[in-house]
Image (spheres, rainbow, N blue to C red):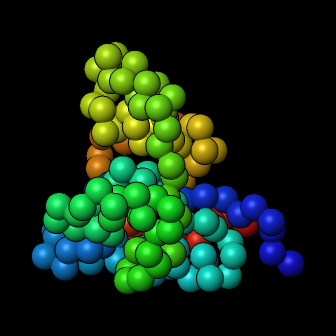
Amino acid sequence: MSRLDPPKVLVDASALRALVDPDHPGYDDIVAVYRDLVEQYRREQVLLVAVDDHLKPLDLGGSPADWQWLRWWLVRPRAGVLAPIDPLRVGFQHRRAAERLSGAGVPLDVALTLVMCRREHVARVLTLDDRLDGYDLDLVPLTAPATPAE
């Protein structure tokens, strides 16, 4: 029996960039772990999520028109390697909290990731960014299977 609300795994900006760029130095490591996470997603063991500010530019690319940004927000296209990932919508209150956190010396992109993890109850993160090492997050190891502990 599958759970109604499986745990979320956040695919952070560094992992997203690596997933869409075969020339990225972390591509092979991220793809290997991501494949395992996608299999868990198919078995409804995890939900894959990403901060929409990080996901949207990779989905749309280049300099999209305003209507394309709006359409993406309303109906995100589900195609390609990023298709299983649901966006975590960033609201004004999330940005404000991230700005306060960045005032304490945390880089703004890291602060936004931390705020979204906290507010959306995300504990596991797939990342190549070592700046997340010192926080209370379960970073998905890149060398071992990403299967959650039973």
* Quarter of the C terminus within the rendering: bottom right
* Quarter of the N terminus within the rendering: bottom right
Report which quarter residue 21 is drawn in: bottom left
In the image, taking residue 137 as reference, residue 67 lies left or right, namely left
Residue in the image at 31% along x and 39% along y = 109
Residue in the image at 13% along x and 76% along y = 23
- Which residue occupies the foreground of this view, 75 or 101? 75
Whether residue 12 is visible to the viewer of this picture, yes or no, is: no
Residue 106's x, y, as percent?
31, 26
Which residue sits furthest right? 1
Report which quarter residue 43 is drawn in: bottom right
- Which residue occupies the foreground of this view, 143 or 136? 136
Residue 125's x, y, as percent?
47, 54
In the image, taking residue 71 as reference, residue 117 lies left or right, namely right
Residue in the image at 80% along x and 66% along y = 4
Residue 134's x, y, as percent?
40, 35
Whether residue 66 is visible to the viewer of this picture, yes or no, is: yes
Residue 93's x, y, as percent?
51, 29
- Which residue occupies the foreground of this view, 39 or 21? 21
Report which quarter residue 12 is drawn in: bottom left
